[in-house]
Amino acid sequence: MIAFVSGQVAAAGPDGAVIDVHGVGFAVQCTPATLAGLRVGDQATVPTSLIVREDSLTLFGFADDDERTVFELLQTASGVGPRLALAMLAVHTPNALRHAVAAEDLTALTKVPGIGKKGAQRIVLELKDRLGGPIGDGAGDVRAPARAEAWRAQVQAGLINLGWSAKDADAAVDAVAADLDGAEPPPPVATLLKSALRKLSK
């Protein structure tokens, strides 16, 4: 297993980044909030989880070790693969997911595209004893804010990666931008993504 990659950020796109490790570029798929902390040209250490399939090797990257641990635990629930686990972490922080599962908050879980009521019930049933309760005082729920000019593209990309059409994603981003009314600095990308998802679910 590749536990982490450490090197210069060579590229950052809507759903992933490339980390140059001594001349080898590792493509890493990440949540929008994780990508918000990566800047092209900067040095970065990204905790990773390698998913091996018959036809592919996919490296997923995370903001910290806790996010990676939750990503791997989520996949122990039946019906939850790496894409859905990443979508869950795009919508909720690790602590928010722990709280939702511990409190059997199906409404919070069904905010993730691809999870219906029955799927949420199954996740609660199978993960309640594995995820545990929220860690710390809740400070871990606050993600680092993205640059003001970057959040629109990151939220739009996050919505498209979660299965929404580009047209719907554009409309939701515009609606969130209207609510912000030029607020500086903007809220964290994860918060903005949740706002966009709420607008799409109406």
Image: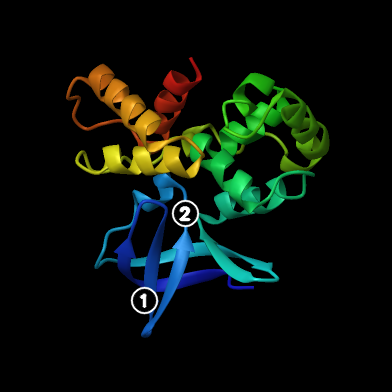
Q: Are marks 1 and 2 in contact (CB under 8 Å)?
A: no
- Numbered label attached to residue 66: none
Q: Position of residue 43 (x, y in %)?
A: 31, 69
Residue at image point 21% right, 32% down: 185
Displayed quadrant of residue 110: top right
**Foreground residue, 1 or 168?**
168
| Horizontal side of residue 150 vs 117, given as left or right | left
Q: Cα distance, mark 1 to mark 2?
A: 16 Å
Q: Earlier in the sequence, mark 1 or mark 2?
A: 1
Q: Residues within 10 Å of mark 1 (few under 14, many from 20)?
A: many
Q: Residues within 10 Å of mark 2 (few under 14, many from 20)?
A: many
Q: Is residue 19 above or below residue 188?
A: below
Q: Is residue 113 left or right of residue 36?
A: right
Q: Residue at x 73, y 38 (%)?
A: 132
Percent of width and height locating residue 28: 47, 64
Task: Please say if 20 is above or below 14.
Answer: below
Q: Position of residue 112 (x, y in %)?
A: 58, 32
| Amino acid type, residue under disc 1 in the picture | Asp
In x, y percent, where is residue 16? 42, 58
Q: Residue at x 61, y 38 (%)?
A: 135
Which residue corresponds to the image point at 57% horizontal and 32% vertical from the top-left? Answer: 113
Where does label 2 land, which residue? 30
Query: Looking at the picture, which amino acid does disc 2 mark?
Result: Cys
Q: Is residue 105 above or below residue 45?
A: above
Q: Quadrant of the N terminus?
A: bottom right
Instruction: Determine which residue is flagged by label 1.
Output: 20
Q: Is residue 176 left or right of residue 57?
A: left
Question: What element does badge 1 sit on?
Answer: strand
